[in-house]
Image (tube, rainbow, N blue to C red):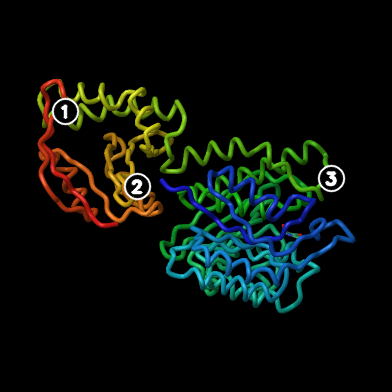
Amino acid sequence: MRQKRILAVHDISCVGKCSLTVALPIISAAGVECAVLPTAVLSTHTGGFTGFTFRDLTGDIKPIGAHWSSLGIRFDAIYTGFLGSFEQIELVKELIDGMSGQDVKVYVDPVMADKGKMYSVFGPDFPAGMRSLCEKADLIMPNMTELAFMLGFEYKDVPYTREYVDDILDKAKAIGAPRIVITGISYEPGKIGAIYRDYSTGDQGEVMADEVPGYYHGTGDVFGSALVGALESGAALKDAVSMAVELTVSSIVRTHSACTDVRFGVNFECGLTQYARSIRDKAPLRIASTDDDIMSIDAMAKVVWPETYDPIIPEGQAEYMVKRFQTAEAIRKQISEGFVYEIARLDGEDVGYCGYKMEGEDVLYVSKLYVLAEGRKSGIGKLMLEAAMDAGRAVGAKRMHLSVNKSNVRAIEFYEHMGLVKESSYYGEVGDGFYYDDYRMGCDL
Ligand code: PXL
């Protein structure tokens, strides 16, 4: 599995945690690389501190983007927030257009207003501009004030009725983003949270939490960064919204309990360990990198190899192969020699693994792909194989191949479904008097 790279496009507020000083650590904690494109540098954010400095970086956006293009640098996702000027909206749209055809997910937080008011640094033309940026997004995450400005309805403070919020969700479809998460939703005093809708599937849900009184700066960025980090780690929208609400609310609770000056932002740092744990539990894939990961593969192999092979190969052969190739010690050695193992997770349990390595410059060899009975029919085999292919492509692989026992009909059908074709037969010695009787299958990448 290839590590994802996100481009976060926000300002740097040097003091008063928000925007990039929040996006970088949170997205990193999700295990995702966070590259940055600073839109402005401010001595502090604009909410509550007076006399802040403001260096507009509009003029740097084009040359930075051009340099990245010249180097062929690509991103898996772009996450935009606070922009330093109206002109930056067009520049960011151009940056997104320049990435078209590269399968880049676009997340837009139309940061410009809260509690019924525009931020002081933005003019009246900003909402229409932001709406045009939102049109390019795969997911937008406005608050109600930003939606009111973009859609032209009158802002109403909480609490809302469910009918009111449903109506706003219906109206927001016109913006054109296929998924939306609205923050700061409350139906009753003391409870606050977020609501999401996927317009293409109709999937909708909400995550509510106990409200802590007061206004906390930078919480929109904590929420947005946690959401983007979780989604790019492979979490479902519902789980990603839960993780984002959990990190935001727990950060507010810690800050409230400490009675700190709220202008300095919330204590999200102490919630990062728990956030990273939730990502690990909800993300479908991870690279085996710890002793626990290796022990987990060792344990899965002891179950899945006999189950797969006992019906189709001579007695004792599966046990022999596990001892030779899938003990923790053997796996450790393979990893040290360039093998990568991915582990698949479902409902908090490890349910499968895939091992692969590069052979020479441009061939990916997938050596192991196993799914425990409880993980079958969940699409996890496909996910693992696609992740392996993606990782191979990223380092220049042009072809992939693997070996499969001729009697493993289920696996052969699956590989054919994935586009692989039988290339040759392979009969060879395993050791201890046992033999392989395999097909070699492969495909272009
Ligand atoms: O968190 C939103 C935000 C980001 N950046 C700057 C801000 C604000 C909100 O006030 O002032 C500079």
Q: Where does the C terminus fall, quadrant-wise?
A: bottom left
Q: Position of residue 348 (x, y in %)?
A: 43, 35
Question: How many residues crowd mark 2 within 10 Å: few (<14), some (14–19), many (20+)?
Answer: many
Determine whether the residue tagged by mark 1 lies in a helix, strand or loop. Answer: strand
Of badges 1 and 2, the one in the foreground is 1
Report the side of 291 relative to 359 (left or right). right
Determine whether the residue tagged by mark 2 lies in a helix, strand or loop. Answer: helix
Q: Considering depth in this image, is 431 or 80 the residue closer to the camera?
A: 431
Report the side of 183 relative to 443 (left or right). right
Residue occupying the point 50% across, 47% down: 239
Gap between marks 3 and 2 measured at Cα: 47 Å
Which comes sooner in the sequence, label 3 or label 2? 3
Gap between marks 3 and 1 measured at Cα: 67 Å
Callout 1, which amino acid?
Val
Q: Considering depth in this image, is 373 or 322 the residue closer to the camera?
A: 322
Residue furthest to the front = 360
Callout 3, which amino acid?
Asp
Q: Considering depth in this image, is 203 or 240 the residue closer to the camera?
A: 240
**Residue 388: mark:** 2
Which comes sooner in the sequence, label 1 or label 2? 2
Callout 2, which amino acid?
Ala
Of badges 3 and 2, the one in the foreground is 2
**Residue 261: mark:** 3
Report if the CB atoms under discs 1 and 2 are less than 8 Å apart.
Answer: no
**Residue 430: mark:** 1
Report the side of 258 relative to 58 (left or right). right
**Residue 189: mark:** none
